[in-house]
Amino acid sequence: METVPGIIAGAADLDPAAVLTATVVGATFGLSIGWVVLISFPVLMTVFAVSSRIGRETRRGLIELVRIRYGGGRAKIMALGMVVVNMAMVIGDIYAVSDAFSLIMLQRRAMFIAVVGFVIWYFLIVSDYKKVTKTLGSLTLVLLAYILAAHRATDSYSHLARGVLLPHIQMTGAYFMAAIALFGSLLTPDVIVWQTSTKRDLPPGVASAHYTESQAGTIVACLISFCVIICASRLHISDPNLVSTRTAAEALNVLGSAGPIVFSLGIIGSGLVALPLIVGSLCFSVSEAFGWKSRLSRAPWEATRFYTLISAVVVIAVTIDLFGINVVSVLYWSQLFAGVMVIPILHYMRKLGNDPALVSVRNTRGENNWLLGALIVSVVANLAFLYSQIR
């Protein structure tokens, strides 16, 4: 039986970018930012439902459908946005996974960067990534330790509820930036593109089962993101640029000496599951925008441009990482850009999901309302951030 891309997409929401972003916003704004996770949950469930149905019924990817229905210009602009977001995530995630290996193995980070890059390339080009993620996906469950850590870090559940449900919303650019980044880390454009692009290779019955499992992945992703915020709220760091992977590991200090090891294993597992997906989504976006053949089910010689692009992305990311970066800043800003990219993606998902020429089962009223609501909130948050910066 085939492995489930849906659960892979759900697990990818727990990639290092999501964990570190939740750590940054929790350390800087505490519980007052937790409401973003709560409103993200129904939106995520809706997006998974609509994107899965579009991919299953049309047998085409999201960017490809935009190109066919609305022109190559719009598709290429969206693909360019995906390249910016996903390339930053690939660079940051490879660095974060290498840093996690360094924490466990007590060796220099540079020793692991090229190895991690080769593993990602091997999964996509040579190996069966779907089968490999069965094993690697279990490593992401180590991050469930954040639930126990959040329980230990909570002195009063009434205080927790007040902090989240009655938040002190700060009318500052930094706060709106944090809200956009946190939303972008959960509703990542690469997951949406992956959901539609991989459904075209699946039998209808199997695709439906994948959607059910992706729902479970969504629940886990939102729960852990919320718990990360609770744990990080004890760090009290004013400047996001002061947060490193080692600082982020301190959020699990309530688990004692096992905290940094648990954090590192979770980052390694989630990174190795998510990175092929992120690289694949970037390459799907570019290939679909230009009309290239782009299916992981094809042999490399049947989709030369697609597989060459995969190799180029990995080589570029590894080369940049070898020069050294502030990984948390890169990932944080990548999630901010992801929060911006979500706007056109939500817009086109709503239009494509209601297009009778493409789908036989159109979006429900509830799905349209959630997509429209998320679109409006995203636009308002981005405009508020822009206004605060200009002011």
Image (tube, rainbow, N blue to C red):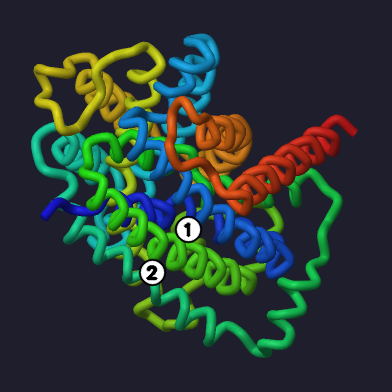
Residue for point 20% across, 22% down: 307
Residue for point 33% across, 18% down: 287
Q: Is residue 368 above or below residue 321?
A: below
Q: Quadrant of the N terminus?
A: bottom left
Q: In the current view of this chain or complex, which residue is farthest to the right?
A: 391
In this figure, which residue is indicated by the disc labeled 1? 19
Residue for point 83% across, 56% down: 170
Q: Amino acid at mark 2?
A: Leu
Tell me how many marks there are: 2
x, y (%) of residue 304? 17, 15
Q: Is residue 138 above or below residue 128?
A: below
x, y (%) of residue 176? 75, 47
Helix, strand or loop under label 2: helix
Q: Is residue 100 visible?
A: no
Residue for point 33% across, 56% down: 270
Q: Is residue 330 above or below residue 16?
A: above
x, y (%) of residue 66? 48, 21
Helix, strand or loop under label 1: helix
In this figure, which residue is indicated by the disc labeled 2? 143
Label 1 packing within 10 angstroms: few (<14), some (14-19), many (20+): many
Left or right: 108 as drawn, with respect to 129: right
Between 305 and 70, the one nearer to me in the picture: 70
Between 30 and 95, the one nearer to me in the picture: 30
Q: Amino acid at mark 1?
A: Val
Quadrant of the image occupied by residue 143: bottom left
